[in-house]
Image (tube, grey):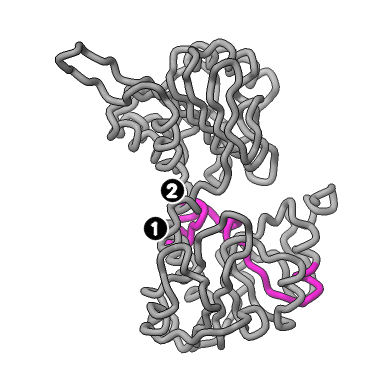
Amino acid sequence: MIVGVAKEISVGEKRVALVPELVPKLIQAGLSVAVQPGAGAAAGFNDTLYAEKGAQLADDAFTQAEILLTVQPPSVDQIGRLREGATLIGFLQPFANKAAIEALATRRATAFAMELMPRITRAQPMDALSAMSTVSGYKAVLLAAGHLPKFFPLLMTAAGTLTPARVFVIGAGVAGLQAIGTAKRLGAVVEAYDTRPAVKEQVESLGAKFADFGLATQDAEAKTGYAKAQSEEFYQKQQEAMARAVAASDVVITTALIPGQRAPVLISAQMVQGMRPGSVIVDLAAEQGGNCALTEPGQEVVRHGVVISGLTNLPSTVPYHASQMYARTVVSYLLHLCKDGRLQLDLNDELTRGPLVTHQGEIVHEAVKAALAAGGR
């Protein structure tokens, strides 16, 4: 079977779905690899590197591939060029990408959305979301440090002592923990909050203080590992407690997401107004509406003297390592699906069934089907 790798066309996307070092693994598994010219150039992987590892160059990976690997969801036009019955593996944004998902069903494509990978132990090598969250958490701190008109670390100089920056991280998942670790390495004083009490030990192991707002959160974690949505009363009390922490911080990094839903608004406009001028908010939930009421997705704005970064797709700004990490998850998943050079799908297997969105002309993922029926665009 031919595994195709397309050149990404989404604006600003520099990652590639397969890096040269992984081509031999696919060949050893009995697969052929066809890479569109220039597919890896923006990430630092030129065509020669792919060819040296045994890949062929293909002018149009969509028409030639039996299994297509992508980073961003393909456009409806690109899907129209897919071989009928082909397999697609990549990020598909399935809950809000109705036209593309329906087009995949029409082409009878077997489409796997990497963002729907189950959060179970067996799936860890295939967890693309966690891999990309690591990049986002790291880059969020660098963005904040670039905007903040202060040093991050404590400095004792001949001109006097400079106090360290105070960083408050909201959400201690993969992105939040990476942000905590990066901010600590830069010398900041770090505090973090999460509705899930179980992450307190992880926060403290990185040298940060866990903010205990005294809210009952025993039922705050879903089986997926993500935080559960809470009641309006909970969020009201949470915001009251959080306002003090936000006002005392130089940098706030927010990471709270709920799959398939708008990100919860945790920082109100009033809370932003209470921050010191020159402070920075980096909103990693911007792509799903943002955790800050004043976030403008895709933009960096200044409100009440506070820089609010709502930039999206931060992993693409570190394309070399982000591509390596993403490609490893995709290849691990593809090799899970393949036996003896052929796709052999066991729909009773949670790893196969969980990310499967379309198959044999139907949208088969029930949550995706329900979301699109309810108005996914």
Q: Which mark is residue 8?
A: none
Residue at (64%, 45%) from the top-left corner? Answer: 259
Question: Alpha-carbon neighbours of circle 2 within 10 Å: few (<14), some, or many (≥20)?
Answer: many
According to the picture, the residue beneath numbered tag 1 turns out to be: 321
Residue 80 vs 263, above or below: the answer is below
Residue at (44%, 43%) from the top-left corner? Answer: 174
Question: Three-letter amino acid code at disc 1?
Answer: His
Question: Three-letter amino acid code at disc 2?
Answer: Val
Give the percent coordinates (x, y) of residue 103: 79, 68
| Residue 62, quarter of picture | bottom right
Residue at (32%, 22%) from the top-left corner? Answer: 189
Question: Alpha-carbon neighbours of circle 1 within 10 Å: few (<14), some, or many (≥20)?
Answer: some
| Residue 185, quarter of picture | top left
According to the picture, the residue beneath numbered tag 2 turns out to be: 135
> Is residue 238 rendered magenta in the image?
no
Residue at (20%, 11%) from the top-left corner? Answer: 160
> Is residue 124 rendered magenta in the image?
yes
Give the percent coordinates (x, y) of residue 209: 35, 23
Foreground: 285 or 140?
140
